[in-house]
Image (spheres, helix red, strand yellow):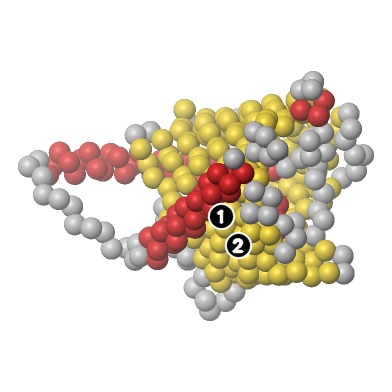
């Protein structure tokens, strides 16, 4: 049985590497060159259908991008070619929560004269920024905000043009106390539109001195329900070679904008592991109210949450999350 699991894990690891390489090779192709359209018997009708599809897809992509920007989603930082600074001051209130505010942050600055392909990264806990989790989910099993334990500086190379395919590669140094360790990450993402759904597949390969080699796979299905409402189902799993373990997360989220300054997030999550056996370790249900305090870069977030951890036999643990977020970016 152990041999079978080991072989399955090795096969999964090779498939992940193959997927990443294929996505990066596709991204490296010139994006401006389009394949010739096949001849059709009714070019006028097909051209009209294509124009309608492109318009609807453009409207949806624009709305989804606005939602991600407003709610400070991780994909905005990972895939934007703009210089950006993200600072979070968070605190959880409830049973078992630490009575303190927790600081975390990261910054990305594109270096001059390199066509926005090379960036300088500064961040807290780089090994936590590979799981694909949303900021609201980065808590401990008892609902506590996970404070920073390390800091890092890295160089990132990424494609300069924002397209449906995106890739990046990082190399840097992680500092923890007086010790320093190198690390490396690579990420590829591809987006397709199918009917009224936007589907995104993202793959991250990473190596950290303290945790070893691993990979995170994330699959998102998003659909615009109405003009102010977006639904997204996000499935992601992180695998570590050293432990042969999967950390799994399933999020069902509804984003709704109330006006140009405020919005609501409704989210239900299930968190699990694969070892020593497949098990859901916690269920989380939350509502997050997000308000733009100042211009486009100061946000306040209030988030009532219900946690059902396995360590407490899935008994409810109500919490309240507070977060002040600063999002600073530079126009292209």
Tell me: 56 left or right of 291.
left
Q: Secondary structure at mark 2?
A: strand
Instruction: Report, in whole angstroms, how far the alpha carbon at label 2 lies from the one at label 1.
Output: 7 Å
Kindly identify which numbered label has been placed on residue 204.
1
Q: Label 1 neighbourhood size at 10 Å, few (<14), some (14-19), many (20+)?
A: many
Kindly identify which numbered label has been placed on residue 185.
2
| Residue at the extreme top of the image, as rendered | 315
Along the viewing direction, whichever of 246 and 271 lies nearer the viewer: 246
- Residues marked 2 and 1 touching at CB (< 8 Å): yes
**Residue shown at 75% from the left, 56% from the top:** 125
Along the viewing direction, whichever of 211 and 66 lies nearer the viewer: 211
Along the viewing direction, whichever of 261 and 139 lies nearer the viewer: 139
Where does the N terminus fall, quadrant-wise?
top right
Kindly identify which numbered label has been placed on residue 59.
none
The percent coordinates of residue 242 (x first, y second) are: 68, 54
The percent coordinates of residue 202 (x first, y second) are: 51, 50
| 154 vs 326: above or below | below
- Marks counted in the figure total 2
Tell me: 332 left or right of 322.
left
The percent coordinates of residue 271 (x first, y second) are: 67, 34
Tell me: 44 left or right of 107.
left
Q: State which quadrant residue 279 falls in.
A: top right
Tag 1 or tag 2, which sits nearer the N-term? 2
Q: State which quadrant residue 186 falls in.
A: bottom right
**Residue shown at 46% from the left, 45% from the top:** 200
**Residue shown at 52% from the left, 31% from the top:** 231
**Residue shown at 56% from the left, 71% from the top:** 118
Tell me: 192 left or right of 209.
left
Q: Is residue 202 visible?
A: no
Q: Label 2 neighbourhood size at 10 Å, few (<14), some (14-19), many (20+)?
A: many
Along the viewing direction, whichever of 287 and 229 lies nearer the viewer: 287
The percent coordinates of residue 12 (x first, y second) are: 51, 49
């Amino acid at each position: 049985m152990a041999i079978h699991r080991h072989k399955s894990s090795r096969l999964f690891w090779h498939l992940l590497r193959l997927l990443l390489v294929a996505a990066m090779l596709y991204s490296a192709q010139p994006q401006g060159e389009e394949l010739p359209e096949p001849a059709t018997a009714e070019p006028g009708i097909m051209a009209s259908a294509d124009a309608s599809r492109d318009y609807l897809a453009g409207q949806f992509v624009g709305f989804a991008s606005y939602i991600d920007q407003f709610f400070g989603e991780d994909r905005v930082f990972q895939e934007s070619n703009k210089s950006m600074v993200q600072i979070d001051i968070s605190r959880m209130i409830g049973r078992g929560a630490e009575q303190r505010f927790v600081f975390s942050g990261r910054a990305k600055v594109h270096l001059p004269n390199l066509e926005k392909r090379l960036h300088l990264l500064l961040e807290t806990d780089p090994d936590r920024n590979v799981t694909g989790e949303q900021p609201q989910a980065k808590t401990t099993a008892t609902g506590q905000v996970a404070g920073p334990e390390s800091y890092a500086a890295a160089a990132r190379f990424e494609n300069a043009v924002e397209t449906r395919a995106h890739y990046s590669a990082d190399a840097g140094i992680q500092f923890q106390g007086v010790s320093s360790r190198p690390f490396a990450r690579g990420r590829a993402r591809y987006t397709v539109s199918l009917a009224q759904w936007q589907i995104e597949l993202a793959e991250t390969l990473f190596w950290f001195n303290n945790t070893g080699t691993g990979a995170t796979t994330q699959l998102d299905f998003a659909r615009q329900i109405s003009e102010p409402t977006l639904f997204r189902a996000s499935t992601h799993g992180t695998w570590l070679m050293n432990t042969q373990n999967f950390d799994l997360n399933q999020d069902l989220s509804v984003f709704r904008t109330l006006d140009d300054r405020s919005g609501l997030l409704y989210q239900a999550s299930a968190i699990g592991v694969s070892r020593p056996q497949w098990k859901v370790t916690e269920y989380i249900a939350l509502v997050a109210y997000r308000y733009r305090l100042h211009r486009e870069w100061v946000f306040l977030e209030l988030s009532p949450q219900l946690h059902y951890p396995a360590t407490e036999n899935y008994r409810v643990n109500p919490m309240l999350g507070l977060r002040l977020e600063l999002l600073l970016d530079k126009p292209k």
